[in-house]
Image (cartoon, rainbow, N blue to C red):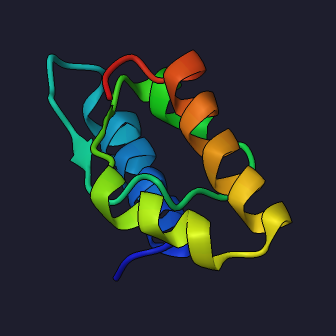
Amino acid sequence: MIGDKANDMLLDMVDKVVDLNVVKDRRFRIEHAQHLAPGAANRFGKQGIIASVQVNYSIPLLFYLEFSNSVYLVSCFAKLIATAIYI
């Protein structure tokens, strides 16, 4: 699964793992993190999750998406850069 819902599901799973097993030196990574729901970027930073972004899939989309969707995609990258620990 790829998309904002899939990323939210994985972020929820990481939250449960940390709640059950306390904070440890883990290196969780989520692929295709360029697809984010509002507020998801903050969750990456909070848990120290590596946000793996496939830019080569996203940049061509900018030419086909409506302007508002293109701005949203770029803002997702900006939020990850501003809040996530690892990209």
For the C terminus, give its image quadrant: top left
The quadrant holding residue 31 is bottom left
Write the residue at 44% across / 43% down: 15
Asked whether residue 54 appears in the rendered view, the answer is no
Horizontal side, residue 69 vs residue 84: left or right: right
Q: Is residue 36 visible?
A: yes
Image coordinates of residue 57 in percent, x first then y, are: 34, 66
Work out whether residue 15 or residue 80 is closer to the camera in this orientation and state it. 80
Q: Residue at x 41, y 52 (%)?
A: 33
**Relative height, residue 84 to residue 67 (above, below):** above
Q: Position of residue 74 (x, y in %)?
A: 63, 45
User: Which quarter of the figure has residue 36?
Assistant: bottom right
Q: Quadrant of the N terminus?
A: bottom left
The residue lying furthest to the right in this view is 68
Rendering quarter of residue 19: top left
Q: Residue at x 34, y 60 (%)?
A: 32
Above-or-below relation of 75 to 83: below
Q: Which residue reaches farthest front?
A: 63
In terms of depth relative to the viewer, which is nearer, 57 or 31? Answer: 57
Q: Residue at x 48, y 73 (%)?
A: 3
**Frontmost residue, 53 versus 42:** 53
